Amino acid sequence: MKYIDKGIFLLLLVFYSSCATTSENSNEVANTDWWESAGAMKIVSLKPENKEIWAELISLDPEIASTQLDAIKSQGFTGIQIWGPPHSGAAYGGLDTYDNYNIDPSAGTNDQLKELIKIAQEKGLLVTFFINLSYFGLEALDWQKAQTDPNSEEHQWFLWSEDGEDSKPPYQEELFTDPDAFEWIYSETADKYFLGVWNDRNDSGKNPNLPQAYWGGSSTWAEEVGNIIDFWMDFGFDGVTIDAPDFYAGSTRNQQREFISNRIKQYGNKYIEAESAYGTSWINEVGYYGLWNYDLAELKSLIVDEQEVADVSNALAYRSSLVDNGGIGTLHLWFNEETERRTMELAMMVGVGDLAYIAGPQPYMLTNEEIGLLELKKEHPALFNNSKILSYNSIDNEALILVKQAHDNSEKILFIINAGDEPFQVDQNTSGIDTASLSRLWINDAESNDGIDPLVIKSFSYGFYSVNIN
């Protein structure tokens, strides 16, 4: 029996054989499905003039960037994700695209970005990017031409209505969002209505006003998406997150597979991820490798916010379904100065086994505990993103107990998070386990009241604890 104070407790129950391998060259980027074992990616931005910055700025000056990247690697990050590299406005951290083929000129040049990617990869960091292929900023030249020239190809990239009463794009093969999410918006320049769903986040309000690209009818937008994918993948990126593909009006599974996922796969072992999209059909039929697991917000409510959650099973069952279908789950974490809160969020991601994307508006340094969590995840297949959840239990909506197993069955881990104020008792069946062979792996700086015997831990303060079988 174990009694555990508020914090995180890790117990490695069974270790059959080690399958984890590391490169002899620590700066070599592995040519494997790196996303299955990646710990965390740090989100960075190229947009110093952006009024809604979601991430730390990364310099395109080689010397400054090298120092920044060294700091990022020293904290245990697997790599960086560049948020919205195309030139854009300020919406959603810089996703309302002005120019799909150039970065923000205030940040630098395309060639400088290519050099940044090369520098990062030489240091052993992976580099991915997050991109919107759905809507345009109001100042985009393509959008201006679409409004003024009804005979142009750009005009065909959008869906128009003379009176705003036409039907909206229907469901496409039960894959896409409710058409009621879209709105008809009047353009004075074109003197007719265009389809929109997102807003430019300006001070005038948050009603939809950004023009939504349309994949159906005579539009050549699908082909243009393929060209945009090719353009950015030629920079040498290791993967990409596609923004909200379930909102791509008029598109089909076949189109997204042909012009997005299959296009990216031509570049070799590259990660393909969908934000917002839900369901394993995005993996099996569209060809993505990972999906943002927004169901984990339920677990964050339980673990971090200490709110009552009726049922955590949906989040964990969904995560398991992604892994069973050959994919992984991911989630975005917002880091600030509330270190206890953010450490609990990161611990949740490590315990569940999802890839974490970490963002914050100011430069931040991970704590020793947070670095230790990322290192622990790298070292143990039972914490990898493709690991299996064998069983779980929630106690009084304040604690979560997980039994994890490596995808290759090489080890098992018992992972416990206690978000409550009081210790609680855990009964774990250890029959058939040679407990004499257990040894402690890592514990944080917090002192343990009674941690000498790893199987009889009666209580300890906020911290992490794990043991391994020799």
Image (cartoon, rainbow, N blue to C red):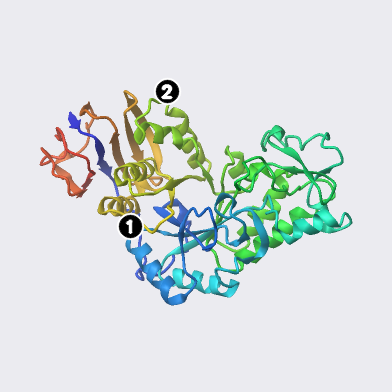
Apparent side of residue 170 relative to residue 122 in the rendered image (left or right): right
Type of the residue with mark 1: Met
In the rendered image, residue 180, in percent from the top left (x then y), is placed at 71, 32
In the rendered image, residue 99, in percent from the top left (x then y), is placed at 68, 62
Q: Which quadrant of the view contains residue 13?
A: top left
In depth, the one of 198 and 221 nearer the eye is: 198
Q: Which mark is residue 365?
A: 1
Mark 1: which secondary structure? Answer: loop
Q: Residue at x 58, y 55 (%)?
A: 94
Q: Which quadrant of the view contains residue 232?
A: bottom right
126 vs 344: above or below = below
The residue wearing badge 2 is 310
For the residues bearing labels 2 and 1, Cβ distance under 8 angstroms: no
In the rendered image, residue 225, in percent from the top left (x then y), is placed at 70, 56
Apparent side of residue 454 relative to residue 96 in the rendered image (left or right): left
336 vs 173: above or below = below
In depth, the one of 329 and 164 nearer the eye is: 164
In the rendered image, residue 29, in percent from the top left (x then y), is placed at 44, 66
149 vs 461: above or below = below
